[in-house]
């Protein structure tokens, strides 16, 4: 068969496919045409916006604010160490349990090349330019002079939309080219090392070791930050810290409550159910506001609580609120473990603690890992609520930037909100992919 | 001694009693402490009769506007009404959107399918508050001033104050009597329909239950409308200029900046979740059902409305119940964009008068009651769609 014939066959195949899927009935043809118009319009508007309309200077100028807010520059090493710890662990875990290495390395390399070379050339700055204007009204001439603030972004090699792409990863602290390179190096190297360790992936020591490292990661990251006053915990940094602490404690609180709900002792059962139902009855925002406003209304207990730093109070609320929801998820898992497992464990003489830690909980939690990750996603999105209680998280920062630089921010709200949305969306989306992967790997519902 | 203790500990009922007594006492102490703090220590609800202080006119209906002279308890009730005015419309719109997108995501048409996927993945992974900020502080604030409004003047006006649309206005002080008449008519209509359907089941004769119910409802509505001297009449919005030269909307309903931002965001956000529920439920209907319907010669539309959707509803409704309760709770976020719902009103009262515990207890009760109402409605629907 000649090349031409093969090609013609391929085209015919495509046409057949389109006939079968896009134009098989009149209704479907109409749907295809309408949604095609919608899709093309959406694509056209997006591309036109990104390439020609958007003004990314404001985002570039404030990128540090979006990531670490007013975190003191000479304490920056704390953030860097935390980032290195997290990145190392993420990379090694990906190497051991993740998918194929090559596409991962290509993506990391491409992003590294983009960020590192973009970081070299350009630094946006505000220039003050004096202007004089002569206005004629009613035969009178008035001279107005003043200072215009103009955003200048020059010196880079790439068009500004390319900078926009890198902003999500942009260097948060001044001259940190080497550190940034090291971070990407760790991302690549860790995965390669992890791949070497992959043959031990079912080894219990390996599993427990990596589990322990992950559990220790969050306290380590948070303890590292204790040298800096919580007043300067801001923006994405604040969101991530509150989220991490919330995840860590809400899991254990949820576990305890779930065990309490199925406890043989009625008093424990009733108090657990009562706690869970009361906490879930009101929205998180109401609890956060309550924790903010509480002074001495609840007697000495309330007074002691209100004397805690606001950020820590918020963390406590996140942990206890998230715990109530996670308890319900874990309870579902506990109920899914067949009764025979419990009976078998008892008949071979395991104590209650052994029965739970060795037989029931591993099966119960395994069954609900995707649902637990779903709760963590909700918790991550809930960190946006900190904006409602006078803490400056990413969302509140965006409002401050828009409000504080009105002269150069004019009309740039879309760019600002797009970047903030990207910060929330990326972590949330990655978590949801993790949940999907866990679901398919663990074979939940298929065994 | 040691042996005695150990015997006591391993004696089933003794240990259970011990644990129950200790934990139960602790729980009772904590609960008593809380209740004591709320009711005994601060048993003071006099602040509720004081004036609210500052007017809040962000509600869409005039009767939900909180005036400065309103007592605080009325302010809180109006705040609860504002919450409900968002939640009811948001649930309706989000369900429609979710149903549409959920079905679109199951379409064999790849373009429609992908568009649905983009919508769901975008809005499911963004915080609701971000959407509210985006609409309130971004999109709607960049609309034109009221002097330079767009839309159709006198009918549908858009400015950065909000969107003014036609609505009904009470012609006299007793217009609400008509609402009661409508409710009564509806109840009677439902009762008659049920009777007629029962008779139809017994005798096999066609009793036209639906037609009777409709006729009764419309009849009661029209007759009472005339008898009550046309209680509600359409009111077109207009823009008036005050003596000081300020412009304002008057008459009609004003979908204020806060309200419309909240409504749009909540609808888009929960529409994505509901779409996933709809998709999952439809996928859970066994494929044999679809094939059976096709082989009986049903059209695509009949297959969906008569075979797939009724079965999918059975799976859908418990999940939707949960999601609607979340909608109800998350509508509180609208207070951050200055919509006068219950939390905003309550916070102002806390700022002016204190009494944190009493006010927050009220919020708590409002949410328990509204969630209970949602849950009851959904459970009733659930009972009706389950296999009998």
Image (tube, rainbow, N blue to C red):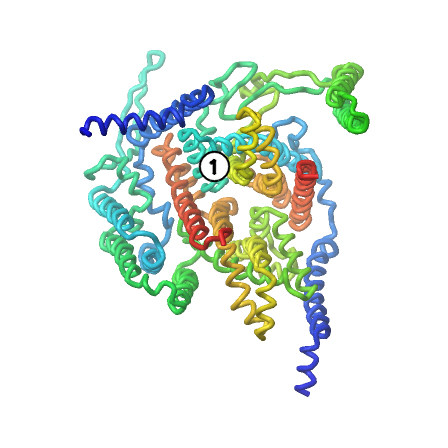
Query: Is A315 positioned to the left or the right of A203 in the image?
Result: right
Q: From this viewpoint, is residue B337 visible?
A: no
Callout 1: chain: B
Q: Residues within 10 Å of mark 1 (few under 14, many from 20)?
A: many
Relative horizontal placement of residue B265, taking residue A300 as reference (left or right) = left
Q: Nearer the viewer, residue A36 or B121?
A: A36
In the rendered view, tell whether residue A394 sits above or below residue A301: above
Residue A316 vs residue A165, the one in the foreground: A165
Q: Is residue A407 above or below residue A87?
A: above
Pick out the residue farthest to the bottom.
Answer: B1
Furthest residue to the top?
A139
Comparing B383 with A402, the one in front is B383
**Residue B229 location in percent, x, y?**
77, 15
Q: Is residue A177 left or right of residue B292?
A: left
Measuring from the top left, give residue A415's x and y in whole percent. Answer: 36, 35
Name which quarter of the figure residue B59 lies in: top right
Decide: is B164 above or below B388.
above
Residue A15 in view:
yes
Closest to the observer, A309 or A4: A4
Q: Say which residue label 1 marks.
A: B131
| Percent x, y of residue A367 | 51, 56
Q: Residue at x 44, y 53 (%)?
A: A438
Residue at the image position 52 percent from the left and 47 percent from the top: A389
Point out the image quarter for the N terminus of chain A.
top left
């Amino acid at each position: 068969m000649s090349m031409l014939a093969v090609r013609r066959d391929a085209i015919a195949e495509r046409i057949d496919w389109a006939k079968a899927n896009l134009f098989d009935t009149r209704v479907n043809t109409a749907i295809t045409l309408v949604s095609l118009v919608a899709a093309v319009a959406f694509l056209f508007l997006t591309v036109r916006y990104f390439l020609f309309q958007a003004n990314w200077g404001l985002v570039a100028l404030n990128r540090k604010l979006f990531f670490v807010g007013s975190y003191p520059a000479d304490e920056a090493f704390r953030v860097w160490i935390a980032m290195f710890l997290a990145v190392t662990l993420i990379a090694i875990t990906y190497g051991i349990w993740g998918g194929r290495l090559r596409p991962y390395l290509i993506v990391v390399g491409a992003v590294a090349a983009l960020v590192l070379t973009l970081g070299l050339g350009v630094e946006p700055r505000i220039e003050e330019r004096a202007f004089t204007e002569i206005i004629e009204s009613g035969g009178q001439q008035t001279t107005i002079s003043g200072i215009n603030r103009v955003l200048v972004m020059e010196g880079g090699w790439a068009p500004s939309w390319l900078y926009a792409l890198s902003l999500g990863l942009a260097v948060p602290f001044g001259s940190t080219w080497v550190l940034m390179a090291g971070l990407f190096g760790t991302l690549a190297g860790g995965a390669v090392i992890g791949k070497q360790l992959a043959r031990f992936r079912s080894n219990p020591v390996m599993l427990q070791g990596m589990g322990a490292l992950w559990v220790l990661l969050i306290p380590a990251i948070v303890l590292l930050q204790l040298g800096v006053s919580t007043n300067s915990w801001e923006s994405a940094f604040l969101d991530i810290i509150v989220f991490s602490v919330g995840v860590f404690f809400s899991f254990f609180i949820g576990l305890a409550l779930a065990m309490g709900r199925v406890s043989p002792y009625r008093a424990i059962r009733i108090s657990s159910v009562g706690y869970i139902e009361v906490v879930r009855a009101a929205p998180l925002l109401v609890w956060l506001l309550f924790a903010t406003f509480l002074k001495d209304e609840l007697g000495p207990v309330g007074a002691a609580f209100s004397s805690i730093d606001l950020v820590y109070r918020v963390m406590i609320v996140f942990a206890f609120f998230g715990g109530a929801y996670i308890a319900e998820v874990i309870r579902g898992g506990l109920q899914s473990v067949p009764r025979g497992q419990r009976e078998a464990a008892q008949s071979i003489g395991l104590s209650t603690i052994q029965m739970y830690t060795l037989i029931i909980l591993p099966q119960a939690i395994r069954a609900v890992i995707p649902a637990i990750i779903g709760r963590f996603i909700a918790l991550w999105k809930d960190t946006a609520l900190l904006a409602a209680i006078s803490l400056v998280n990413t969302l509140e920062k965006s409002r401050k930037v828009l409000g504080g630089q009105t002269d150069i921010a004019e009309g740039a709200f879309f760019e600002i909100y797009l970047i903030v949305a990207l910060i929330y969306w990326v972590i949330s989306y990655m978590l949801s992919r993790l949940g999907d992967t866990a679901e398919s790997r663990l074979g939940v519902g298929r065994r | 001694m040691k042996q005695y203790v150990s015997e006591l500990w391993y004696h089933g009922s003794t240990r259970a009693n011990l644990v129950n007594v200790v934990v139960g006492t602790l729980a009772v102490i904590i609960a008593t402490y809380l209740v004591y703090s709320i009711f005994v220590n601060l048993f003071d609800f006099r602040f509720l009769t004081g004036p609210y202080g500052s007017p809040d006119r962000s509600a869409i209906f005039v009767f939900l506007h909180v005036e400065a002279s309103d007592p605080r308890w009325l302010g809180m009730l109006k705040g609860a009404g504002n919450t409900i005015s968002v939640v009811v419309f948001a649930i309706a719109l989000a369900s429609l959107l979710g149903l549409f997108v959920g079905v679109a995501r199951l379409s064999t048409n790849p373009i429609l399918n992908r568009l649905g996927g983009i919508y769901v993945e975008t809005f499911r992974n963004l915080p609701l508050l971000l959407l509210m900020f985006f609409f309130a502080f971004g999109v709607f604030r960049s609309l034109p001033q009221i002097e330079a409004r767009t839309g159709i003047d006198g009918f549908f006006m858009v400015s950065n104050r909000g969107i003014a649309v036609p609505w009904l206005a009470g012609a006299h002080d007793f217009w609400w009597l008509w609402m009661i008449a409508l409710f009564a008519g509806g109840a009677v209509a439902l009762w008659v329909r049920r009777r007629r359907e029962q008779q139809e089941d017994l005798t096999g004769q066609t009793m036209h239950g639906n037609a009777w119910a409709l006729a009764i409802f419309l009849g009661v509505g029209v007759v009472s409308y005339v008898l009550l001297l046309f209680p509600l009449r359409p009111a077109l919005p207009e823009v008036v200029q005050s003596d000081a030269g300020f412009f304002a909307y008057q008459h009609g309903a004003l979908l204020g900046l806060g309200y419309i931002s909240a409504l749009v965001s909540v609808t888009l956000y929960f529409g994505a979740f509901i779409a996933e529920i709809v998709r999952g439920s439809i996928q859970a209907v066994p494929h044999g059902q679809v094939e059976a319907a096709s082989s009986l010669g049903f059209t695509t539309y009949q297959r969906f409305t008569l075979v797939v959707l009724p079965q999918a509803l059975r799976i859908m409704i418990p999940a939707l119940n949960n999601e609607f309760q979340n909608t109800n709770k998350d509508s509180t976020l609208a207070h951050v964009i200055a919509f006068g719902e219950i939390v905003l009103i309550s916070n102002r009262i806390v700022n002016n008068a204190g009494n944190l515990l009493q006010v927050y207890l009220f919020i708590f009760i409002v949410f328990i009651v509204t969630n209970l109402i949602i849950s009851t409605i959904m459970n009733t629907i659930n009972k009706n769609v389950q296999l009998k």
